[in-house]
Amino acid sequence: MSKPSHILRPGKRTAELSENVKKQFSAPSSVKNVLPEFDIPKHDSILQCFAAVPRGAEELTAAELNQLGITDGKPGRGGVSFSAKREGLYRANLWLRTASRVLLKLTSFSASSPAELYAGVHAIAWQELITPEMTLAVDCSLRDSAMTHSGFVALKTKDAVVDRIRESRGSRPNVDTASPDVRINVHLHNNVCTISLDSSGESLDRRGYRLERNEAPLRETLAAAVVALTGWDGSIPLADPMCGSGTIPVEAALKAAQIAPGLHRQFGFQRWIDFDDELWNRLCLEAKEAIRRLPVGLVTGYDLDNRALLLAGKNTFNAGLEGQIHYFHAAMQDFKTDSDKGIIIINPPYGIRLGEEDDLRELYCQIGDVMKKQCRGWTGYVLTGNLELAKYIGLKASRRYVLFNGAIECRLLKYELY
Ligand SMILES: C[S@@+](CC[C@H](N)C(=O)[O-])C[C@H]1O[C@@H](n2cnc3c(N)ncnc32)[C@H](O)[C@@H]1O
């Protein structure tokens, strides 16, 4: 699923749109209820879900779902469709490391016009999901469709939702984009509109451990995808000699310590009317009982920047990993190891956001030298958004994976170091 291109802002009303847009899109009241009523899934129903995933990591998320016992995951562009009961939906939010949000699909219908959109949204029994006292927000993404104004689609959806609630309950809920009780997701593709509830709320890369940001941190979900692609299982050392704020070591350690990445945060579904507190507490307890302590020296991080290392320490503490990742103020060029096996993951600056390309050529040459001379028997990985610079590593990559760091297309390059 593509990134939401529009989020409905509070106070944005039809009146703010141009007269032309209003004329083009105003829905006659006669189109209301032309679609059959759509019933809300009941407590024990099988739910149709979609894990939205940064591009390149879809197969990894499907494998993660499989480990959670959800075996029907179908990876597609930008996400994985799967079905689960409510427990599976909660579990997916709590445990998925590589997905950015989990949507619960309510319905989909053809919508080439605002009238069809309005009717399709209005046919959902929203009053069973949202009371007038609750707040809502609508996120919209669209492509290849007759309606091209994502702001308007979000607005029209909101109108149909609040009208339906007002008709049934006598008053309507308000919009709150910052922290809504219910976040509605509208996805329009080839004139087919899919309406979902966003069960995650805040995106899943917000684990709750990173309170401050350094200059160029990786997204947590991307760092988790990198660790997953290395196949590291926690039995040999993992080192990040340019660790910055420690995202890679923290994500690796969370995985090895079997800490659920969502254990320290809240989710959208916790504010839904049908939230099952007992079930959720049981899943959290189960997750806490699964945690194990990591041996000294298993996961290490190094950086030249003391401020970054300070953040890495704070993130590690907040993630519940105090004393389990060891950080060193050291240059990557001085990296040495006593272990004959291990995984080294390097995320160097790549000239787009940090440093300039010319200065970085020498650094990439040194990365190649360190891996070749000081990491014999290890497997090396370099994550970079700059393929020109990557050539200066001077070693032959045995595999290349395409991943996205936000909008930046990156490569994870794998090196067998004999
Ligand atoms: C792209 S950032 C890494 C970001 C990190 N993955 C994170 O999530 O915060 C590159 C890091 O390399 C560090 N660095 C640059 N040159 C270095 C060197 N020669 N030795 C060690 N660290 C270096 C920088 O201080 C910076 O923190």
Image (cartoon, rainbow, N blue to C red):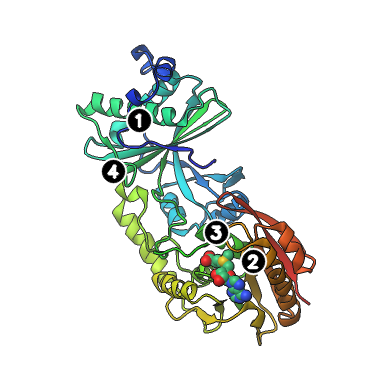
Helix or strand or loop: what does disc 1 sit on? helix
Above-or-below relation of 353 to 43: below
User: Which disc is residue 273 wearing?
Assistant: 4
Q: Which residue sits at x=78%, y=77%? A: 418
Q: Are marks 2 and 1 in contact (CB under 8 Å)?
A: no
Mark 2 lies on residue: 231
Above-or-below relation of 119 to 92: above
Task: Locate residue 386, reporting x and y percent.
Answer: 68, 58
Mark 1 lies on residue: 158
User: 132 and 372: which one is in front?
Assistant: 372
Mark 2 and mark 3: Cα distance apart in space: 14 Å
Q: Earlier in the sequence, mark 2 or mark 1?
A: 1
Disc 2 crowd, CA 10 A, few/some/many (<14, 14-19, 20+): few
Task: Locate residue 137, reporting x and y percent.
Answer: 35, 39
User: 256 and 57: which one is in front?
Assistant: 57
Mark 4 and mark 3: Cα distance apart in space: 29 Å
Helix or strand or loop: what does disc 2 sit on? loop
Q: Are marks 2 and 3 in contact (CB under 8 Å)?
A: no
Q: Earlier in the sequence, mark 1 or mark 3?
A: 3
Task: Locate residue 306, reporting x and y percent.
Answer: 49, 77
Mark 3 lies on residue: 67
